[in-house]
């Protein structure tokens, strides 16, 4: 018995393809993972006469369950799949950025066609470090230092940035003016869905383009 053979004449096959194509924009679950994490895909159904297929992006069949056995299929996930026949699940290990997409779980028995489960996976780079770069200029006519600070994170190329401390702001860039001998301590936080890093810098207006700085990374 095999429910996963393509057949243009199969009404069930036509309806199944129609259902999947129409549902891909409305996943049942959205999952956010970091690079290197794993994804659990569990077919939590009664085992009697159960057949299951796991599919990626509605095109690539990655595993099947039939006759109480799970079989891996040739795909980009083949070497990274871990199978568990006790709870009818597969794990996709060592997730990569390019694994982001929609995974589907199609299951049926001789008498029941279960609703297809759609899992939208988003894989993100970890933020590995964050630094504050700064430059300043001295305006003798106003006796002020003009500081330009830029927060730079490594890892995820598009994190969210926020500033706190003596001034609160969002975004990677910050401009502040200080009078002679004044100082400001600023904290920049870079974050995404799976990680967060921050660093602190204190700048002091010394005049004539000279200033001191103190940086602490956490």
Image: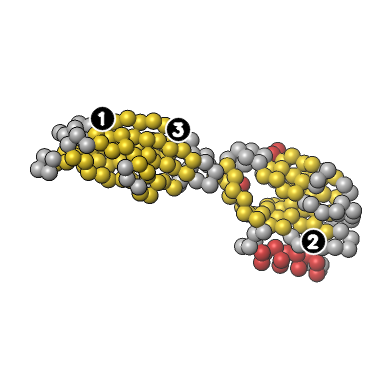
Mark 3 lies on a secondary structure that is loop
Residue 89 in percent (x, y) is at 77, 46
Residue 44 as seen in the image, left or right of residue 214: right
Residue 144 in percent (x, y) is at 17, 41
Along the line of sight, the residue nearer the viewer: 211 or 24: 211
* CB-based contact (under 8 Å), mark 3 and mark 2: no
Q: Residues within 10 Å of mark 1 (few under 14, many from 20)?
A: few
Residue under label 1, please give it: 212
* CB-based contact (under 8 Å), mark 3 and mark 1: no
Residue 21 as seen in the image, left or right of residue 14: left
Mark 1 lies on a secondary structure that is loop
- Foreground mark, 3 or 2? 3
Q: Residues within 10 Å of mark 2 (few under 14, many from 20)?
A: few
The structure residue drawn at horizontal position 59% and vertical position 48%, both measured from the top left corner, is 32
Give the mark, 2 or 1, whose residue is nearer the N terminus.
Answer: 2
Quarter of the view holding residue 186: top left
Residue under label 3, please give it: 218
* One can see residue 98 in this view: no
Quadrant assignment for the C terminus: top left
Quarter of the view holding residue 102: bottom right
Residue 172 as seen in the image, left or right of residue 12: left
Give the mark, 3 or 2, whose residue is nearer the N terminus.
Answer: 2
The structure residue drawn at horizontal position 85% and vertical position 63%, both measured from the top left corner, is 112
Residue 199 in percent (x, y) is at 40, 35
Give the mark, 3 or 1, whose residue is nearer the N terminus.
Answer: 1
Quadrant assignment for the N terminus: bottom right
Along the line of sight, the residue nearer the viewer: 178 or 94: 178
Q: CA distance from mark 2 to mark 1?
A: 66 Å
Along the line of sight, the residue nearer the viewer: 63 or 198: 198
Say the numbered circle drawn on residue 104: none
Residue under label 2, please give it: 114
């Amino acid at each position: 018995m095999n429910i996963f053979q393509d057949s243009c004449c199969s009404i069930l096959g036509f309806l199944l393809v129609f259902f999947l194509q129409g549902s891909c924009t409305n996943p049942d679950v959205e999952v956010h993972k970091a690079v290197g994490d794993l994804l659990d895909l569990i077919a939590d159904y009664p085992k009697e006469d159960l057949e299951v297929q796991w599919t990626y992006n509605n095109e690539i069949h990655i595993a099947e369950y039939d006759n109480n056995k799970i079989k891996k299929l040739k795909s980009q996930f083949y070497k990274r799949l871990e199978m568990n026949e006790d709870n009818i699940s597969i794990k996709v290990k060592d997730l990569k950025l390019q694994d982001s997409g929609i995974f589907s779980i199609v299951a049926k028995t001789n008498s029941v066609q279960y609703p297809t489960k759609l899992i939208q996976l988003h894989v993100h780079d970890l933020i590995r470090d964050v630094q504050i770069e700064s430059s300043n200029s001295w305006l003798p006519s106003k006796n002020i230092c003009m500081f330009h600070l830029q927060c730079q994170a490594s890892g995820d190329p598009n994190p969210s940035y926020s500033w706190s401390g003596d001034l609160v702001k969002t975004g990677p860039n910050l401009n502040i003016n200080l009078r002679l001998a004044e100082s400001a301590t600023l904290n920049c936080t870079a974050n995404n869905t799976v990680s967060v890093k921050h660093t602190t810098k204190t700048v002091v207006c010394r005049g004539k383009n000279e200033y001191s700085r103190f940086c602490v990374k956490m």
